[in-house]
Image (spheres, rainbow, N blue to C red):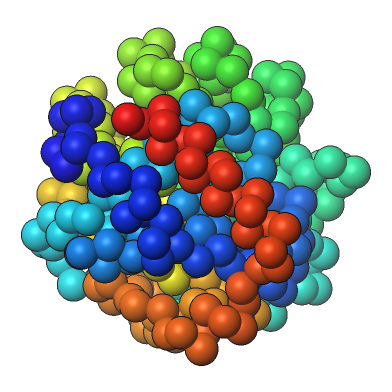
Amino acid sequence: MTPSGTEAIPPLDEVLAAAVVVSLPMRVRFRGITAREVVLLEGPAGWGEFGPFPEYDDVESAEWLRSALESAWLDDPAPLRAHVPVNATVPAVDPEQVPGILARFPGARTAKVKVAERGQDLAQDLARVRAVRELVPHVRVDANGGWSVDDAVTALTQMAAQVPLEYAEQPCATVPELVELRLRLERSIPGGIRIAADESIRRADDPMRVVRAGGADVAIVKVAPLGGIRRVLALAGELADCGVPIVVSSALDSAVGMGAGLAAAAALPDLPFACGLGTGGFFTADVATPRAMSNGTLPVGRVAPSRSGLDAVRVDAERERWWLDRVRRCHALLE
């Protein structure tokens, strides 16, 4: 396998030989789910993870399989650092829940706060952001494309007046909206607010489009949706040429998938922002012993799930068939 896009894909029977489908229970609802299902694949280099969300089609999901095969069949690139700084992630919870959530991220000096949740209003977002800022020095917000341009200008202007914002992640859904928002924020707020693109990069046919259009100051990248560690590193090189730094983030990965994100972050020449790789604390059970966060960082390195750990979170036969059929369809697309 190579990073060129012409990988020699391992045969399907080898891919399925050691495939295990698991469901990881979560402490709080995140992305509308309370359990995270993924397929773990064992290959000659170790373990890989295939976990596209259920609503993703097979074409998009095939890149997640490409990433899993890279991890299981190829060694990781040489690391440039042994530990990666990570941010805390605060779901759309009430302010009184914030201290308990941040306690799961010992030493973290940066927090990403979910905002623009359906059924909630700006006052709730502001209260949550203020509660986080009282406990950590660096705050970024993530709207998951949930605002219109007008709503984003209103919300971010009010937030920035109360709390310094490191950046706003995917405040609007489309590239033209992000471009317009950046221009309007530059006019309304001295110095503007950095805009970070997430979905506009990882779910785009052309990940560079939003940067070339002038819609992003920071790029959020996730290993699995982009097709693997080497593709992330290649994209990071292109973005660096445009003066845009990247933040490696989690796709709500298990301990196995998190290893790929940490490997990518560890291999980057520059890492100016804390990465979004601290989501392991959202699970009440995982397939391996969780990495211990210390001083806001996580250690780099692969993990191997234990058989007892796998058996404890294995799905039933019906869900296993559903996922393995998905692997078969995506494998056919890669071939």
Horizontal side of 3 relative to 103 (left or right) equals left
Horizontal side of 50 relative to 299 (left or right) equals right
Residue 135: percent from left, percent from top: 59, 72
Residue 119 occupies which quadrant of the picture? top right
Residue 267: percent from left, percent from top: 17, 54
Q: Nearer the viewer, residue 145 or 95?
A: 145
Image height of 140 relative to 5, above or below: below
Image height of 267 relative to 282, above or below: above
Residue 26 occupies which quadrant of the picture? bottom right
The residue drawn where x is 80% and y is 73% is 96
Q: Quadrant of the C terminus?
A: top left
Report the number of numbered marks.
Answer: 0
The residue drawn where x is 62% and y is 77% is 313
Q: Quadrant of the N terminus?
A: top left
Residue 22 occupies which quadrant of the picture? bottom right
Horizontal side of 144 relative to 240 (left or right) equals right
Residue 99: percent from left, percent from top: 68, 77
Image height of 288 relative to 207, above or below: below
Q: Is residue 251 visible?
A: no
The residue drawn where x is 32% and y is 55% is 14
